Amino acid sequence: MALLELKNISKIYGELKALDNVSLHVDKGEWVAIMGPSGSGKSTMMNIIGCMDKPTKGEVLLDGEDISRLPGKRLTDIRRDKIGLIFQQFHMVTYLTAVENVMVSQYYHSMPDEAEALEALGRVGLRERAKHLPSQLSGGEQQRVCVARALINHPELILADEPTGNLDEANENIVLDLFRQLHREGTTLIVVTHDPEVAEAAQRTIVLEHGRVAREVVNEHFVE
Amino acid sequence: MTKRRMFLRMVTASLLRRRSRMLIALLSIGIGATILAGMVTIYYDVPRQMRAQMRSYGANMLLMPAEGETFDSERLSAALQKLPADALVGASPYRYVRLDMTSRQQSFTTAGTDFEEVQKTSPYFSVEGRYPEAPREVLVGKAIAETIGVKEGSDMELTWQPAAKDASGSAEDDRVPGAALSGSAKGFGDAMVYVTATLDDQARIAEIQIDASTQTPEYGGRTAEDALFLKQFIGKALPLEMGNDVDALSGATVTSNAVVEALNTATAADAAKPRTTRYKVTGILVTGGEEEGYVFMSTDDLQALTGEDRLDVAELSISADEEQLNAYAAALTGDGVQARLVKRVTKSETAVLGKLQALVFLVTVVVLILTMICVSTTMMAVVSERRREIGLRKALGASDNSIRGEFLGEGMFLGLLGGVLGAVLGFVFAQVVSVNVFNSSITFQPLLLPATVLVSMLIAAASCLMPIRRAVAIDPAIVLKGE
């Protein structure tokens, strides 16, 4: 069953076609990687999937609902309720502790719950660092806090934008292991990346070029 | 944990953990609130204080007898009862009469007044020497003192002449049973000795009183008090013969003779007679005004001299604004008394205070505007500094209203802290200004604290409007692929 379906979407900025008639189908529980060189339309696609932008043409179905024509306010609601975001630059609120950063996500979603936030930190192995400020955490630790923040509200879809771009190999593996865990639990994952190793961890890789889907690769070595 | 607690946690964390930037905003609100609180305190408190100070420019209300009425100390005190005690700075009664200085063949306007009150209503009076305290002490205006050459410590004799209408009858005719007689004669050193006596139903002396205050106290002066000397007059019929009817007091022959002569020439007491008293000059009055041409004595002394309890006018110094003064004047008028404002004083007072308040008001408004600009600029910088964080919050699902609420919350919290800080510092500031500039301390107005806090919070909120607009406009997509 499709969680996300892009139907012939285009995004046109004046003369420039950032996305040109792209279609994509992601099933519930699937782990998909999106690759492509800069300017291939990765970011635009990410923005549209993340409910932060709308296509010029085409339909975006998330959980069966067409979100491509919804007003900004409704998009915010859908993003909050269904999508967990992970960024390359981590983006933590600098003056809040690790656990408070996780709670911010709860705060906007429903109700802050410190115990639950601590549990989520425990899952990414940072229970002991819960009271630390971002400046006291390493990059890898910060990204793990962001993973905890993304999964705290049990989103249908986790959208990760170059999640390992700023991490060393050890931390990259930790994050990928977390993704594997989430995948096993049935979370749908879409990971935008430059890194072939990260892409190979996914079940399927979509390669974008010049705003079109150039090819699609199914990872045969994928281990469940 | 409730949403509200998380909200407070985020807002306080933002303020407490990002100290430097917030300190600037807090400082600007704090300084604004300080000046606001200080200025408001000055605005309300100093006019009250200055009114008291301005009372040094002299009386601002006059009380006079109404048409065809007479004015006396009783009516004055009855009128003063109608004023609130804390508003009345002082009330000086005045009675003006011409007194002669026989030895110089000159006459001076003499004012009978209450010196204690004069010092309150006319604090600008300057006395070389001291104000009179005991009976028969006078203050002499500088102009007079220079003309007749009296100094502090000099004696001067002043004579009161009754109006010419009292042409008295002869001494014999007035000696009727029950009559009250009074007479005078020259005693030692040609100074006057006064005697009053009442006659019984057989026209014999029933009571006698001697005023020998002009005589040497140890000699002639004793005639007024010596019981044996006084007793020998009782029951005698007039006229008396010295040595036969009565004996002189030893050491006071001249005065004793004067007493007898005064009795023998005494006429009915209700007929006013000239009277002379010797006074001691305790000080020279320097005012630079017309008061320098007057002699001042206590109302009691003047009453003793003229035998009348009368006042011409009372000068009142009242601490109040013009509107209140008019109300007081209306309240005081009546019962044979009329009150009127000294326009010259009240008008200039009102003008000065009005200008001062306008200035304070203007400064306050300017400071508030500057505070708003400063806070607004700081918050603007805060928004640009936190673009990424705002974008993140939006990406995490924050609605525009959440973003507004958070920034407004931070702003109001700053306003609260700044307001409390400002109210306290403002009071100190106002106190310092008040003590250094106006020489008066001020009382803390309890209402000032909530008022300052409220205004600070409103100003902080207003300053946040523009920055909030900018924050709401931030695109959440900036968190993706951010450089």
Image: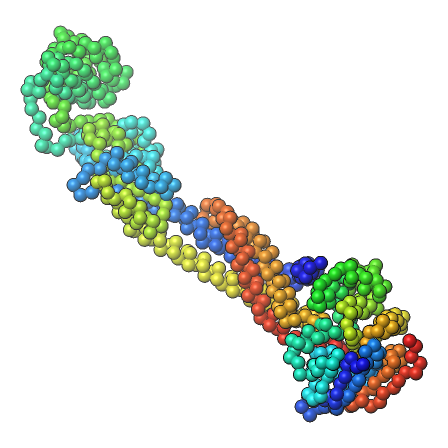
Colour scheme in use: rainbow
Residue B158: quarter of image: top left
* Residue A149 position in % (x across, y down): 77, 68
User: Can residue A11 be spotted in the picture?
Assistant: no
State the residue at coordinates (20%, 36%). Answer: B97
Q: Quadrant of residue A184?
A: bottom right
Residue B74, x across and y down, in percent: 26, 34
Compare residues B420 and B358 and report the one nearer the observer. B420
Q: In the rendered image of this protein, does residue B18 appear above or below residue A27?
A: above
> How far across and down, in percent of the image, does residue B172 sit?
6, 18
Q: Nearer the viewer, residue B322 or A153?
A: A153
Is residue B463 toward the left or the right of residue A20 in the image? Answer: left
> Does residue A164 appear left or right of residue B425 in this picture?
right
Task: Name the residue located 48 percent from the left edge and 55 percent from the top edge.
Answer: B39
Question: On the picture, is B372 further left or further right than A42?
Answer: left
Residue B240 sits above or below residue B48 on the image:
above
Q: Residue at x 34, y 39 (%)?
A: B90
Q: Nearer the viewer, residue B352 or B240?
A: B352
Quadrant (top left/top right/bottom left/bottom right) for the N terminus of chain B: bottom right
Q: Using the image, determine if residue B38 lies above or below residue A121.
A: above
- Note whether residue A218 is visible: yes
Q: What residue is rendered at 73% in x and 67% in y? A: A105
